[in-house]
Image (cartoon, grey):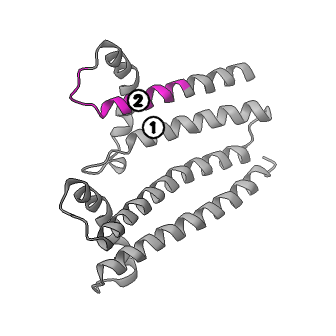
């Protein structure tokens, strides 16, 4: 059984690498990359396309479906590796792995939005040309987050843009820190469950 789980974990890791290469190559959309890339696309695109069906992973400018696809494969690889190390897989260990995987995705999203908001804060404080393509993309990503967080705290009252960016960054950073502590504690509890 350990051999099968080790093999499955290794194959999952190899497939993750192929998907990562495919995603990187997709950034060169206009270039003709040849038959090897076509074969790579035939191997990876059905799995990636399955994840692209979910609108929660896509916005008008950003497609996070490859991140979700890789996270799911990482979860499978972690489960296989844990079963090999412990020689068994209890419900508690499985719950801890799933919780950590979900938190991994959530913390990635929180970290991403914190970085975007910090970039926006930098542009605001240094009077950068916010009409360039880069800053328009940053704005299109940051505005929905800013809007939702400021509406939670201030309802319909208007607030200063700088205050909104600082508040939103602080809230996301606090959620990131609290989530990290909570998930760590819950994972420890789950792993000790005698199930």
User: Quadrant of the rendered structure where residue 181 is?
Assistant: bottom right
Q: How far apart are marks 1 and 2 (CA)?
A: 8 Å
Residue 126 among those drawn in magenta: no
Residue shown at 56%/54% (left/top)? 103
* Relative horizontal placement of residue 131, taking residue 151 as reference (left or right): left
Asked if the residue at tag 2 contacts the one at tag 1, i.e. Cβ–Cβ closer than 8 Å, the answer is yes
Read off the magenta span: 14-32
Mark sitting on residue 69: 1
Residue shown at 35%/69% (left/top)? 121
Element on which disc 1 rests: helix
Residue shown at 25%/59% (left/top)? 135
Furthest residue in direction top, as rendered? 35
Q: Where is residue 20 in the image (x, y as percent from the top left)?
A: 44, 32
Q: Nearer the viewer, residue 65 or 91?
A: 65
Element on which disc 2 rests: helix
Q: Nearer the viewer, residue 122 or 179?
A: 122
Q: Position of residue 141 (x, y in %)?
A: 31, 59
Q: Position of residue 43 (x, y in %)?
A: 40, 20
Question: What secondary structure is the magenta-colored segment mainly?
Answer: helix
* Relative horizontal placement of residue 89, taking residue 118 as reference (left or right): right
Q: Can residue 1 be seen in this view?
A: no
Q: Can residue 193 be seen in this view?
A: yes
Residue 22 among those drawn in magenta: yes
Give the number of callouts.
2
Residue shown at 30%/71% (left/top)? 124
Q: Nearer the viewer, residue 193 or 78?
A: 78
Q: Position of residue 23 (x, y in %)?
A: 37, 33
Label 2: how many Cα within 10 Å (few below 14, some 14–19, many 20+): few
User: Quadrant of the rendered structure where residue 166 is?
Assistant: bottom left
Q: Nearer the viewer, residue 43 or 108?
A: 108
Mark sitting on residue 47: 2
């Amino acid at each position: 059984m350990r051999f099968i789980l080790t093999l499955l974990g290794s194959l999952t890791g190899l497939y993750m690498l192929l998907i990562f290469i495919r995603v990187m190559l997709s950034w060169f959309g206009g270039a003709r990359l040849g038959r090897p890339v076509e074969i790579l696309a035939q191997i990876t695109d059905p799995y990636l396309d399955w994840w692209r069906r979910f609108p929660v992973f896509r916005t008008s400018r950003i497609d996070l479906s490859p991140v979700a696809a890789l996270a799911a494969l990482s979860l499978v690889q972690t489960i296989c590796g844990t079963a090999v190390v412990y020689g068994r897989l209890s419900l508690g260990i499985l719950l801890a792995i799933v919780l950590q995987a979900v938190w991994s995705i959530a913390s990635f999203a929180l970290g991403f939005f914190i970085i975007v908001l910090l970039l926006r804060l930098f542009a605001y404080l240094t009077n950068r040309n916010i009409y360039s393509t880069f800053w328009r993309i940053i704005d299109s990503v940051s505005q929905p987050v800013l809007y939702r967080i400021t509406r939670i705290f201030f309802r319909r009252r208007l607030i200063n843009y700088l205050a909104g960016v600082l508040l939103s960054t602080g809230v996301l950073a606090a959620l990131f820190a609290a989530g990290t502590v909570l998930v760590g504690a819950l994972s420890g509890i789950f792993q000790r469950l005698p199930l």
